[in-house]
Amino acid sequence: MMFDNVTTVCASKYFNPQQLRQLHSKGVFHFGENQAQSLLKKVAELQDLPIHWHFIGHLQTNKVKDIIEVIDTLHTLDRIKLAQEIQKHAKRPIDCFIQVNLTNEPQKSGVDPENLQQFLLEIKKYDKINVVGLMTMGKDHDAQITEEAFRRLDELANAFHLPYRSMGMTDDYACALKHHTTHLRIGRKFLEWLD
């Protein structure tokens, strides 16, 4: 489940801290959490390990102050209000992916692609935000729409000269690799690594 030149983030909501220790001992150093409370609990229990913590879920503005100093990378920057909260509470620049909604699903977060250029311009005023790339999610059970979303994210990242693309999960990572993902967010597949 490791690929050359791709950062594989273990979506660790599936695992308890002891299982994360086991995965860490096998060479998994990047873990991603979806919920602030779960992240804080695991960070506290695993603080003796060198782990790169990613936040990969929708981040509520009222949770920013709790987690922003314990994560290394945020994958879901999707609105200016969230950027303002990060600016207010972060003591250092935070690596951020801008989430882009490329499947036209209203229940999914993300900047509309036609608004991305303006969003990137506005984000420049916040010195605690270091935009490293773009993130998107595919559409469940629709390989064609997922592939189109991944292809467009790759195009957008190129157009805006952003080096990283966060896309691809357990069910669609092969498609994401085809379209030059640099960060996979894999969960269930890591169950195979546990004794």
Image: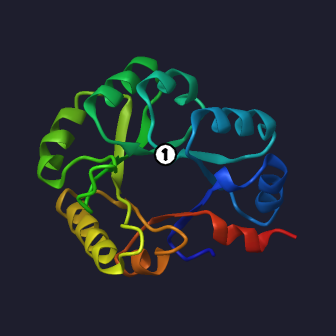
Q: Horizontally, is 20 left or right of 59 in the view?
A: right
Furthest-right residue in view? 195
Residue at 79% over, 66% down: 26
Q: Is residue 41 visible from the viewing direction of this image?
A: yes
Residue 178 spot, x, y in % from top left: 38, 82
Which residue is label 1 attached to?
A: 57
Which quadrant: the N terminus? bottom right
Give the colour scheme shown: rainbow
Examine the image and state in which quarter residue 71 appears. Answer: top right
Q: Where residue 189 appears, x then y in whole percent?
A: 65, 72
The kind of residue tagged 1 is Gly
Left or right of 22, for residue 104:
left
Relative placement, left or right, of 46 versus 81 is right
**What residue lies at 25% left-to-right and 74% top-to-bottom?**
148
Around disc 1, counting alpha carbons within 10 Å, would you say few (fewer than 14), some (14 to 19), or many (20 or more)?
Answer: some
- Does dot 1 land on a helix, a strand or a loop? loop
Residue drawn at point x = 35 percent, y = 59 percent: 136
Of residue 49 and residue 77, the one placed in the foreground of this image is 77
- Between residues 195 and 50, which one lies in front from this camera angle? 195
Which quarter of the figure has residue 58?
Answer: top left
- Which quarter of the rendered picture does the C terminus lie within? bottom right
> Could you tell me residue 76's position as x and y percent?
40, 45
The residue sitting at 66% across, 53% down in the picture is 12
Relative to 189, residue 64 above or below: above
Q: Is residue 127 visible?
A: no
Residue 177 position, x and y percent, is 43, 77
